[in-house]
Image (spheres, grey):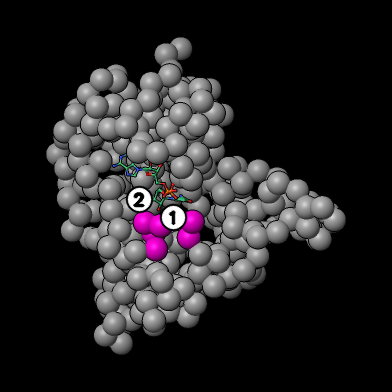
Amino acid sequence: MKKVRVGIVGSQFAATLHAESYKRCLWAQIQAVAAIDNLDEFGDKYDIPNRYNDYRRMFEKEDLDLVSVCVPNFLHKEIVLAAVEAGLKNIVCEKPLATNVADGKEMVDRCKENKVKLMYAEDWIFAPALIRAKEIVDEGGIGQLLYIKAKESHSGTHSLYAQKKEYCGGGVMIHLGIHPIAFLPYFAQSEISEIVGMKSTGGQGNLLHKNYTGEDWAGALITLKNGVRGFVESNYITCGGMDDKIEIYGTEGNIHIDLTKGSPLTVYSRPGYGYAIEKADFTHGWTQPAVDEFMSLGYVNEINHFVDCVMNDKEPQKGVRGEDGLKALEATFALYKSSETGMLIKL
Ligand SMILES: NC(=O)c1ccc[n+]([C@@H]2O[C@H](COP(=O)([O-])OP(=O)(O)OC[C@H]3O[C@@H](n4cnc5c(N)ncnc54)[C@H](O)[C@@H]3O)[C@@H](O)[C@H]2O)c1
C-alpha cells in the first residue's frame, strides 16, 4: 500500500509530538522536514531523508500528501497559505489556528476555495480518557450533561516566541487554554454563545512572569447554545508538571479526569531519572511518571485520524476541522475582550 508522504515544518517540541505519532502510524512516512534550527538532530532521530531550511523550497521540491505545521503561532498563516499556493491538498495546523481571528478566517476561506483539507491539531479530542468519558456521557451514564470545568496549566512556556504577545497572539489562554476552549463545544455538541473572562494583563500586570508580554493567568465562564455551562482556566503559575484536569457534571453523576498526573505508576527515586511528565522540574522522591504522553494526550490517535482522512479522502471529524480552530480563536478573543471591558460577550 502506498504510504502518505509527510512533510513537517518545525523541528522542536510540537514537531516531535507529530514525528513520534507519524512513526507509530503504519500508513505514513516522514519524507521531509523544514526548519531553521535543530534540523540534523531532528532529521537523524526520525530518519527523515530530505531536510530544508526554507519551507517554501520543501513545498516546491517534494511531492507531499500531507504537511504538518509545527512552528510558532505567528507563522501559521504564512505557512498554511504558502502550502495552499504550492498546491498542497492536506494541511495539519497546530493550535492556535492563528494569532487573530481575521487571519484564521482567511486561512479557512483560502483552504475552502482551493479544496484543501485544513485539519486543526486539537489533541484533547483524541485523548483516550476523554474519548472514554464521552462514550459514558453519550450513553447516558451521568444523565443529562450540565457543566464542564476544564483547565490546562504549567509553570511557563519553553518557547521564547510564546512569551511574547506579538508572536503568540496573547498569553496563556490562547497558548494553553485554547485546548479546553475547543474541547467544551466538541464535548457538549453545541457552540459557545456567551463568555465572560478575566486575566492578568501581561508584563508587570502578570502574577509571576513579568517578562511575558501576554497574560500568565486567565479564566472564563461560558454558556453554550444548548444551555450547558462551562468554566475554563489556564495559568503559567502551576509548579510540578503540566496540569490538565477536566470535571464533567450531569444530572445523575459526574466524571473527573486527570489527563497528565493520573498515572498508574508511582515511583520513589533517590537519584532521580530522565523524565516524568511535561514541565516537571524533578524526578527524585515520589513521582508519578506518564506511561506514554504521546498516547495519553491524544497525539497518536490524532495523527492517525489525519492520515486516515488523507488516505481515504475523508473529512476530519468535528472538533479538528479548520473551522473548529477558528471558532476556538473567536471564543478566545471574546474572552480577551470581556476581560478588558468587564462585559459579557455574546458570540
Ligand atoms: N498540541 C499541543 O499540545 C502543542 C504543544 C506544544 C506546542 N504546540 C504548538 O506547536 C507550535 C510550535 O510550538 P513549539 O513549542 O514546537 O515551538 P518551539 O519554539 O519549540 O519550536 C519552533 C520551531 O519552529 C521552527 N521555525 C521557526 N521559524 C521557522 C521558519 N521560518 N521556517 C521553518 N521553521 C521555523 C523552528 O526551527 C523550531 O523547530 C506552536 O504553534 C504551539 O502552539 C502544540
Query: Where is residue 5 shown, x and y percent of the image?
Result: 38, 22
Q: Nearer the viewer, residue 246 or 260?
A: 260
Q: Which mark is residue 72?
A: 2
**Residue under the point 28% across and 26% down:** 58
Which quadrant of the figure contains the C terminus? bottom left
Query: Where is residue 271 shown, x and y percent of the image?
Result: 82, 52
**Relative height, residue 275 to residue 21 (above, below):** below
Amino acid type shown at disc 2? Pro
Left or right: residue 280 compared with residue 301: right
The residue segment tinted magenta is 157-163
The answer as to whether callout 2 falls within 8 Å of ligand 1 is yes
Q: Nearer the viewer, residue 6 or 186?
A: 6
Q: Residues within 10 Å of mark 1 (few under 14, many from 20)?
A: few
* Circles 2 and 1: CB atoms closer than 8 Å: yes
Q: Which residue is mark 1?
A: 159
Q: Which mark is residue 192?
A: none
